[in-house]
Image (cartoon, helix red, strand yellow):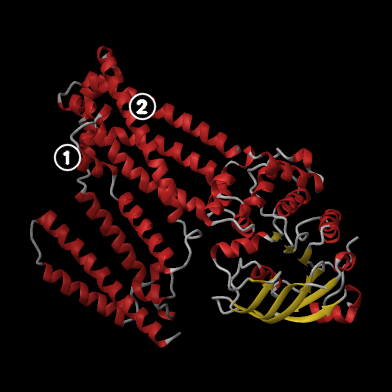
Amino acid sequence: MKSMIELKNLHKVYATGTHALKGIDLEVNEGEFCILLGLSGSGKSTLLRCLNRLIEPTSGDIIIDGMDVVAAKGKKLRHIRRKIAMIFQQFNLIKNLSSLTNVLTGKLGYSSLVHSLTFSQHKDDVKTALENLRRVGLKEFAEKKTRNLSGGQQQRVAIARALMQNPKVILADEPVASLDPATADSVMRYLGELNKSDKMTVICSLHFLSLARKYGTRVVALKDGKIVFDGTPKEIDEKKFKEIYGEDAEEVEIR
Amino acid sequence: MKKENKFKLSLQAILTDLLFWIYIFGCVSFLINHWFEKPIPSSFVVIFGVAVGLISFILGLSVARKVFLPTIRTAKKWYKSFWGWSVFLILLITFVVGWNLVEVDLYKLFTKFQNAGGIMSGIFNPNMDILIICLTALAETIYLALLATVFAIPLAFILSFFAARNLMPRTFLGNTVYIIVRTIATVFRSIEAIVWAIIFSVWVGIGPFAGMLALMIHSIASLTKLYSEQIENIDPGPVEAIKATGASTLQIWIFGVVPQIISPYLAFTIYRWDINVRMATIVGFVGGGGIGLLLLQQQQLLRWQNVGIIIWLIAAVVWIMDMVSAKVREKLQEM
């Protein structure tokens, strides 16, 4: 199986002195659905943002699809980012623009400035965007401003935006943490589908073991900036769970 | 407490006490001179001020002790303590000095009303014959305010991006650009439009053009500040998301930043036009043209009925602008 993401001895020390990542070594193969577990502050968000350099890693190597992410600069970096889509906890849509325009912004990395300013004039871009909205079941919401959509709908618009990038990797930073359990499951189902039918590699941080078991093919747990568990979802029993989340933790089922 | 920290605090405390008492004795000497015409040499003021300041500081009772280095001795109710009465004294003496400097005269206020009779009767009997001339001057004022605002928008819009902390990278170049743009905007804003009008009325001659330039400079500076603060308050999430798609910096600004700021920008701009119309009248007084200049001329000629009509027209325009801009801004908030 082809290796998609390779991290070697990755460190991140913030200007405040916080040592958020302490030597992460990780290899993720193409087509895996890798769940990141860990307490808030364990380094999950930092790790995800280092992968597309929204945060600059302090040292270490990141290879994604054979490309050296750490060494890339300017245009090269932007070309790498096109292939790595990201989904956020707060959806991060531009709220006073329509769903369609928000989805079209996924194409920015592929467009020149002039082209991007005239997005709505390009039939093929609009067609792809509408197709992606249809995939997440929101075609009839294309013209609606995203501020008027529910949380689950907004996250689906964000997924459509990610699809616009035609990515090989999807990074999802607690994509369902702001959603109710039923909506959370439906959003995860879309991510699962992209993973299975489009063969996209997904790295997704979560707090719910039930969702991890249902969708993940692999679980990596972080604690204090280090990997403390790496295995299949089935291997996480009560003992392992307490190791990751601390002695007082109880697993909460969401169903 | 760290040693150097304590040293710094003590230094601040001593200086505060000295200035505190020098100020009090300065006020006292002014009052003595004002009432009894007995000038007191400034060396006396300094010597007394320093002496009382030092003694009260050393005894540990002073105001600065209370503020910088509080101890048991200063932890009393204000009316039972030395620092309390010192503060009372400084407030009282400041008020008395202010009253005398401003030449407050209640007798004049309540007995010399007839002096303003001319202007008052002018206001209630405005001269309608010069309405057309006034309206022409008024149009000049409104249009010069409009042009000043319109010309200021693009410049302020572009500058605001460079004056926004969250958009400027924390590199040497980024910091330099940020600090330069910020400083220039602050300096230009702190110079009143009326001063700019004096400068430009000499530069391009008295008239509406000078007034327009004055208001434009002031508008650019103040809109840059308002705009950039708006950028600093945007939600960083969408910016991050756009960045993650592989967009260039300019694309990030256009798609991640601009949509978030466009409606507050419009609201600020309309508010600015509203302010500019009001300021255009004042600017006219010092050579900026328009209704302000006309008002100045008529006032100097003591044509109170002409002054009357001008005052009514200015009031009407300010009132209408105020209402319109409030309504438009309300609508923008809903967008």
At mark 2, the secondary structure is helix
- Dot 2 amino acid type: Ala
Depth order, front residue of B21/A53: A53
For marks 2 and 1, the one nearer the N-term is 1
Residue at 61% x, 58% y is B246
Q: Is residue A219 above or below residue A103?
A: below
Residue drawn where x is 54% and y is 45% of the image? A114
Residue annotated with mark 2: B315
Name the residue carrying label 1.
B202
Chain for mark 2? B
The location of residue B331, given as percent across then percent down, is 57, 34
Q: Quadrant of the N terminus of chain B?
A: bottom left
Q: Position of residue B62 (x, y in %)?
A: 33, 75
Q: Amino acid at mark 1?
A: Val
Q: Position of residue B105 (x, y in %)?
A: 21, 41
Report the number of numbered marks. Answer: 2
> To which chain does the residue with label 1 belong?
B
**Disc 2 to disc 1, C-alpha distance:** 29 Å
Q: Quarter-wise, where is residue B217 in the image? A: top left
